[in-house]
Amino acid sequence: MDPSALKSPELQHFLNQEKERAMINEMVGKLTSACWDKCITGTPGSKFSSSESNCLSNCAQRYMEMSLMIVKRFQSMQ
Amino acid sequence: MDSFSSPPSGTSSQFSTNDIMDQVKTQLEQAYAEQFLEIVAEDIILTLLQLSQTVRDKCFDKCITKPGSSLSGSEGSCISRCVDRYIEATGIISKALFSQR
């Protein structure tokens, strides 16, 4: 592999995909940790209650909604 | 390289240089590939290590509320349920993020 191969579109595409995957994994990990603390208040059972699992998915969706709101808020300040 | 299109040995110093270049190239490619796989393996190990540390901390909070002189049976079963639920929670979160768009 000569150094110019590092600039090949295929490799760049692959690297970008991997970066995106890493970002998504990091986000999922962070959200799981934060939403676990908010939603799982008792000792863990052998199954999630429906309120626990609803809380977890609401938590993730509200987080994304909130981050969008914050971006918009900052944009409106400029 | 097509060895049949060149004249047979004798005057072909150019040819053997190319051969060596090819060999070096192949070895380099192999080295790159090996290094790449090493990095991937390292990354997987690191990710698992980080996850297990997070789960350990979360489940320690939930299950070991009053540390005794040894892990009790109920603490042990709490830990295994806790680990299972944490993995399940990870699935719920990623589903919530990506199925709704």
Image (tube, helix red, strand yellow):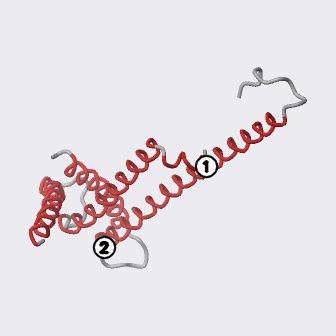
* Residue under label 2: B61
The residue lying toward the viewer, choosing from B55 and A29, is A29
The residue lying toward the viewer, choosing from A46 and B37, is B37
Residue B95: x percent and y percent? 23, 48
Q: Is residue B1 above or below residue B70?
A: above
- Res A62 label: none
Residue A8: x percent and y percent? 48, 44
**Along the horizontal axis of the image, is B92 left or right of B51?**
left
The residue lying toward the viewer, choosing from A3 and A35, is A3
- Residue A68's quadrant in the figure? bottom left
The span from disc 1 to disc 2 (Cα, nearest Å) is 44 Å
Label 2 SS: helix
- Residue A29's quadrant in the figure? bottom left
- Residue B29's quadrant in the figure? top right
**Quadrant where the image shows the N terminus of chain B:** top right
**Along the horizontal axis of the image, is A64 left or right of A26?**
left
**Along the horizontal axis of the image, is B83 left or right of B40?**
left
Q: Is residue A73 above or below residue A52?
A: below
**Residue type beneath disc 1:** Tyr
**Along the horizontal axis of the image, is B90 left or right of B31?**
left
Crowding around mark 2 (Cα neighbors within 10 Å: few <14, some 14 to 19, many 20+) is few
Q: Are marks 1 and 2 in contact (CB under 8 Å)?
A: no
Label 1 SS: helix
* Residue under label 1: B32
